[in-house]
Image: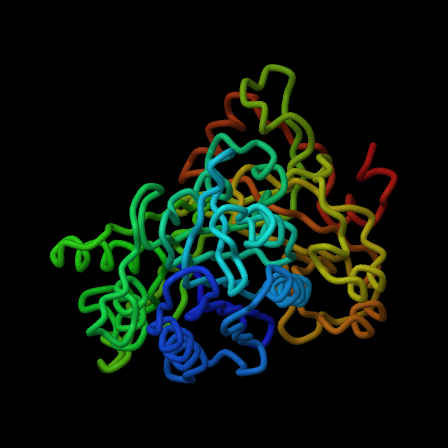
Amino acid sequence: MTGLSDARRSRVVLVGSSTYDNFPAIPAVTNNLTALRDVLIDPQRWGLDPDACRVVHNPETPRDVHTVMRRAAAEVDVSGLLLLYFAGHGVIDPDTGVLHLAVGQTMPDSAYSSAVPFDWVRRLVQGSRSAHRVVVLDCCYAGRAIPGLGSADDAALATQVEIDRSCVLVAASGNRVALAPPDEPLTAFTGVLVELLRDGVEGGPALLDLGTLHDEIRRVQWARGRPIPELRARNGGDRIPIVINARRAARTPERPPPETPRLDSSLVGRVLRGAAVATDPELDGAVAILAHSPIEGAIGVRLDRPATRSPAHVLGDELAASLHVPAVLDGGPVRDVVLLLAVLRAGVAPPDGWRVLGPGLVVMPLDADPARAEAVVEAAYLFVGYLGWRPHQLETELAAGDLVDAGTDLATWLADPQQAWA
C-alpha cells in the first residue's frame, strides 16, 4: 500500500445541492459537505489544506459546478489526489440513459440542458495530471456513472489514464434511489462514509483505502436494509488511501521486524534486449533493470516505447522544460508508478532525496526544484509504468534466451539520446 497522497498537491471538490426549484429539498446534504470537509482537513486523519478543499453548496447552474471542478483538475499535481464528490438528486436522461447531477435550476424533463452531465466529470478526471483519482456520488441512480469511468470495455479511458489509479464509489446501483432518512443528520451513504473516515475501521489497515471503505459501507448498509454501494476501480484504484485509520492510529506502533538483507545483483543498471526467440511481447525492445534480488524478484522499464502523454502533463511545465525531457515512455504494463530517471552532470553529487541507482544515475523526485534539477542533470527520461519479475523469473528468462545483455548500462544509454531512440 502506498502512503497518503501529498496534501499540499491534492485537490478536493465537494458539491452538494440541498435546495431545488423543481425537486424536493434534501437538507442533510448541507451537513454532508461540512462533515466531509472537517474530516479531510483534520491533521489527525489526512491534513488537507483547507484552501485545497473547495465546497460548492447549492449551485444553481451546471456552470457553477464545472468551473470549480475544472480549476481543481488543472491544479492537482501528479503526486496529489483528485477527489470529486457530489450529493443531491441524480437524473437520468430518458433518451440516452445517461446520468446527470441535478443543480438548483435543473428541470426534470430537460436534464440534458439544465443538469451536470456525468461525462463532464469523467472528462475532467481523466484529463487531470493526478495519478490518484476518486469520484464519490451520493445520489439516485449513481451506478449509471460506473460504465463511464471504470468499465474495462472503455478503451478510450484505458488509453488516457495509462498508469493512473482511478476509482468510482457510488451510493446506489444504476436503478436504485439513494436515501436521506429524515431523522438522521447526514444522508444514509455519506453518514456511514464520514463515520468510517472519522472513527476508523476495527481490524482495518493503517490507512483506509477505497476498497476497505466500500466493503465496510456495504456491510453496514446491508445490515440496515439500505441501498448497497458499488465500486469500480482501474489499475489498483481501490487501494488509494484516503485517511489514517483512527482505530489503528490510537494503538502503540509495533516495532517492525528486522529487514532482510537485499541481495542486489550486478544486473541493476544493465540494459537488456528481447531476443528474437522471445515469446513475451512486453520484452520486445530494450529493457533496463532498476532493481534485482534473487529472493525478491526484479523491476525494470522499457526504453523505447513512447506513451501518449506529454512530459508537461505529467511533471508540470516548469520541471519538464528545465529538464528538456524528450518524451514520456511506456515503461511497462504495471501501471501504478511514474519514474523520472536522470543522468547527473560529471562531478555533481546527487541532491538529498534523490535515490541513487548507480554511478551518475538517479531516480528524481517528481517535485524536484526545477532550477536545481537543471543545474545538475545532464539528461532525463520519464517513464509511466514498469516491468516486474517474480523471484527467479528474470534469471529463467535470461537462461532461456528470451532476454540478452545489450552490452551497455543505463547511464550510458540515457546520456546519448540518439542511441536511446535507435
Looking at this view, name the residue that lies furthest to the top: 277
Question: Residue 126, percent across and down?
Answer: 60, 49
Taking the spot 44% from the left edge, 61% from the top edge, the residue there is 2
Q: Which image quadrant for residue 359?
A: bottom right
Q: Residue furthest right?
A: 418
Q: Is residue 418 left or right of residue 353?
A: right
Residue at image position (52%, 49%) is 336
In-front residue for pair 2/20: 20
Image side of residue 386 versus residue 242, left or right = right
Quadrant location, the N terminus = bottom left
Residue 349 falls left or right of residue 257:
right
Image position, residue 231 (x, y; %): 36, 48
**Looking at the image, is 146 positioned above or below residue 341?**
above
Colour scheme in the image?
rainbow
Identity of the residue drawn at 80% across and 39% down: 420
Q: Residue 254: x percent and y percent?
A: 25, 76
Res 267 visible:
no
Find residue 407 and report its horizontal and vertical position in percent: 72, 35
- The image quadrant where one finds the C terminus is top right
Q: Nearer the viewer, residue 132 or 150?
A: 150
**337 in relation to 87, above or below:** above
Q: Is residue 297 visible?
A: yes
- Of the pair 175 and 129, the residue shown nearer to us: 175
In the depicted view, which residue is nearer to us: 326 or 166? 166
The residue positioned 65% from the left and 42% from the top of the image is: 270
